[in-house]
Image (cartoon, helix red, strand yellow):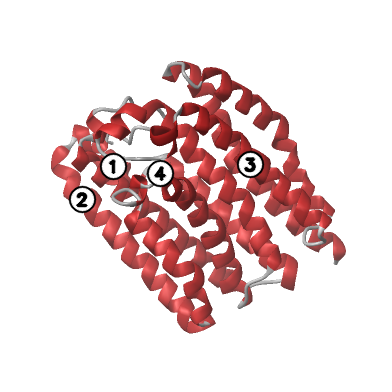
């Protein structure tokens, strides 16, 4: 078990659930617009997305260990690293190798689709690869880039990228659908930064709350929650989504509760924030899943 923990720890395996959610959302928009798609290409896109997610996780583990950040943070199920490298310092090279190998596999999958679907894939492919490679070392030094990069990677890059490889074109349905994970995934990083402000600042990070304070983090968190749901309603009103897509609004009560808890406990300890960090993960996974089901149902019901 210890060997498996060392081998898979830098991948942050529980975090990888986010990738199938975003890939399935991209597949749902492709199904909605054209009625079918190639299953083998869907599976390849899923593999590429998982490689990219593993890469950013492993490189993040390596960089945070190398900078000393993981030695200063208090770990939670959602922040502070996996603890693999502090417990096994000699395996840092393995984490770096894992990150680079899976990044190379991501590029290989992308190159296959580049040949199959054309240069249009570069529109999301290049920003996606750059976000993976540059995130921890460089993007976390800029408040705006640090805030937006995770959402762009899992929203427009992943959702629209999957839709593009399955349909061969970019469309407004996929763009509109990508906004929900864009807002929610960026929010996932915002809320997970609350416990680590002092250690993050000590190693040179300059994300939103380090520069502008916790109140700014609470405001942005609330605004991004509104954006995640409002984008769905606007897309439905514009005729891009079927009415069934509105099923994703079912998580609004949980989102309101979570926002209230984050606002109330933003200056409290980790223990007070943990329940709301958990609920935020549920919102981030369930809302795009329901959106994907609603969009697919709209196509199915329409025949």
* Mark seen at residue 94: 2
Q: Position of residue 231 (x, y in %)?
A: 70, 50
Q: CA distance from mark 1 to mark 4?
A: 12 Å
State the residue position of label 4: 13
Q: Which mark is residue 4?
A: 1
Mark-to-mark CA distance, 3 and 2? 33 Å
Q: Is residue 78 left or right of residue 262?
A: left
Q: Earlier in the sequence, mark 2 or mark 1?
A: 1
Residue 5 relative to residue 33: left or right: left
Above or below, 265 against 177 in this view is above
* Secondary structure state at the residue bearing disc 3: helix
Look at the numbered discs 3 and 2 and tell me whether their residues touch, using CB distance below 8 Å.
no
- Eye-nearest disc, 4 or 3: 3
Q: Is residue 234 visible?
A: yes
Mark positioned earlier in the residue sequence (3 or 1): 1
Please say if the residues under marks 2 and 4 sit with CB atoms less than 8 Å apart. no
Q: Is residue 38 among the parts visible in the rendering?
A: no
First-in-chain label (1 vs 4): 1
* Coordinates of residue 61 in the picture (x, y in percent): 29, 43
Q: Please state the horizontal and vertical placement of residue 155, each as a whole percent of the image.
A: 56, 55
Other residues around mark 1 within 10 Å, as few (<14) / some (14–19) / many (≥20)? few
Mark 4 residue element: helix
- Residue 276: image quadrant is top right
Look at the numbered discs 2 and 1 and tell me whether their residues touch, using CB distance below 8 Å: no
Badge 2: residue crowd in 10 Å (few <14, some 14–19, many ≥20): some
């Amino acid at each position: 078990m210890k060997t498996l923990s060392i081998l898979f720890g830098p991948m942050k395996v529980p975090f990888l659930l986010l990738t199938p959610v975003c890939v399935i959302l991209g597949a749902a928009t492709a199904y909605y617009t054209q009625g079918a798609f190639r299953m083998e290409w869907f599976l390849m896109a899923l593999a590429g997305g998982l490689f990219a997610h593993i890469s950013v996780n492993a490189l993040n583990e390596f960089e945070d260990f190398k900078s000393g950040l993981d030695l200063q943070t208090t770990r939670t199920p959602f922040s502070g690293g996996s603890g693999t490298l502090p417990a096994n310092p000699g395996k840092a090279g393995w984490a770096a190798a894992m990150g680079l190998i899976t990044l190379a596999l991501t590029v290989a999958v992308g190159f296959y689709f580049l040949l199959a679907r054309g240069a249009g894939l570069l529109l999301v492919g290049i920003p996606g690869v750059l976000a993976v490679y540059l995130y921890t070392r460089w993007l976390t030094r800029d408040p705006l880039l640090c805030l937006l990069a995770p959402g762009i990677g899992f929203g427009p890059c992943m959702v629209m990228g999957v839709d593009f490889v399955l349909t061969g074109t970019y469309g407004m349905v996929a763009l509109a659908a990508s906004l929900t994970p864009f807002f929610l995934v960026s929010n996932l990083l915002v809320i997970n930064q609350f416990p680590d402000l002092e250690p993050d600042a000590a190693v040179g990070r300059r994300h939103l709350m380090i520069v502008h304070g916790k109140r700014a983090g609470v405001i942005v968190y609330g605004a991004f929650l509104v954006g995640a749901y409002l984008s769905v309603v606007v897309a439905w009103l514009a005729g891009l989504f079927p009415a069934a897509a509105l099923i994703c609004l079912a998580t609004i009560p949980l989102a309101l509760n979570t926002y209230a808890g984050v606002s109330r406990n933003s200056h409290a300890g980790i223990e007070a924030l943990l329940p709301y960090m958990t609920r935020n993960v549920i919102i981030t996974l369930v809302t795009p899943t329901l959106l994907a089901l609603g969009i697919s149902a709209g196509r199915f019901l329409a025949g």
